[in-house]
Amino acid sequence: MSFGDPNNPYGAPQGQPPQQPPAGHPGYGYPQQPGVPQQGYGYPAAPPVSQPYGGGPVLTQMPGITRAAQIMLGIVALAHVIIAAMYGYALSEWDETMAEAGITGDSEAEAFADLGKGVVVFFLGLAAVFAVLGLVLLLQYAKGGNGIRVCSIVYGSFAIVSGIFMIAAYGLGLLIMVVAILLIVFAAKRTSAEWFKRPRY
């Protein structure tokens, strides 16, 4: 039985050209076309990744919103330095002010004066601690982890409270409250979270 036999059911149909494989899918025995990636068996080529585990690009420069949060943090810390200086000045003038007010010599009045002096010392220490904490957080923005962002939000929350106590001090308290709110908003942004959660190698 020959290949050209018209009665052969396994032979090629007469008058039809042999079937060619579709473009991009070469069959057996066909050479691979240059520039066309081999498809079919096996896994497809993996897409390029910019960092391990297929995550997004690694942030190498602090985003603007995070930089704004850092600036707000610096303003709040500086405001507490000014508050501490104001309390320190009031404390240095305390005894002289009490003497001019005629408090000396009266044991009951002196007891109230000492109580007031203790309150001033407490707020002086609190403002100094706030200033130091703000400075520490400020210096950690470039290399700190997500804990720095969380501490900044908590710091801003307490700064709002301290601003309420200083609301009558030449508008300084109002400034602290506004800047502290901005600090919380900027630090809570997703971009800031991505900056502090970025991988470090």
Image (cartoon, rainbow, N blue to C red):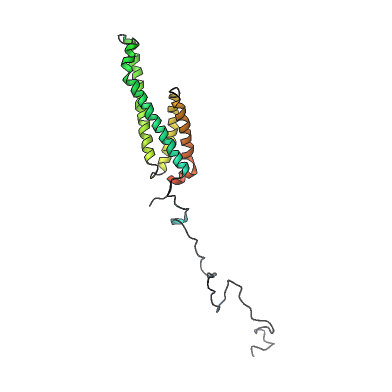
Q: Residue at x 42, y 32 (%)?
A: 76
Furthest-front residue in view? 170
User: Compared with residue 114, is residue 193 higher up or lower down, i.e. above or below?
Assistant: below
Task: Please state the horizontal and vertical placement of residue 96, each as a whole percent of the image.
Answer: 31, 15
On the image, the x and y values in percent for residue 157 come to 45, 32
At a point 49% along the width and 41% down the height, the residue shown is 189
Q: From this viewpoint, is residue 87 visible?
A: yes
Nearer to the camera, 176 or 196: 176
Left or right of residue 189, residue 2 in this image:
right
Q: As drawn, which residue projects farthest toward the left?
A: 105
- Residue, x 32% and y 12% (percent of image)? 99
Instruction: Determine whether, in the image, residue 161 is placed left or right of residue 93.
Output: right
Residue 121 visible in image: no
Residue shown at 46% from the left, 33% from the top = 179
- Judged from this view, the residue extending furthest toward the bottom is 1
Quarter of the image with the N terminus in it: bottom right
**How many numbered discs?**
0
x, y percent for residue 15: 69, 84
- Quarter of the image for residue 176 reads top left
Image position of 60 with respect to 122: above or below: below
Give coordinates of residue 88: x percent, y percent.
Answer: 33, 24
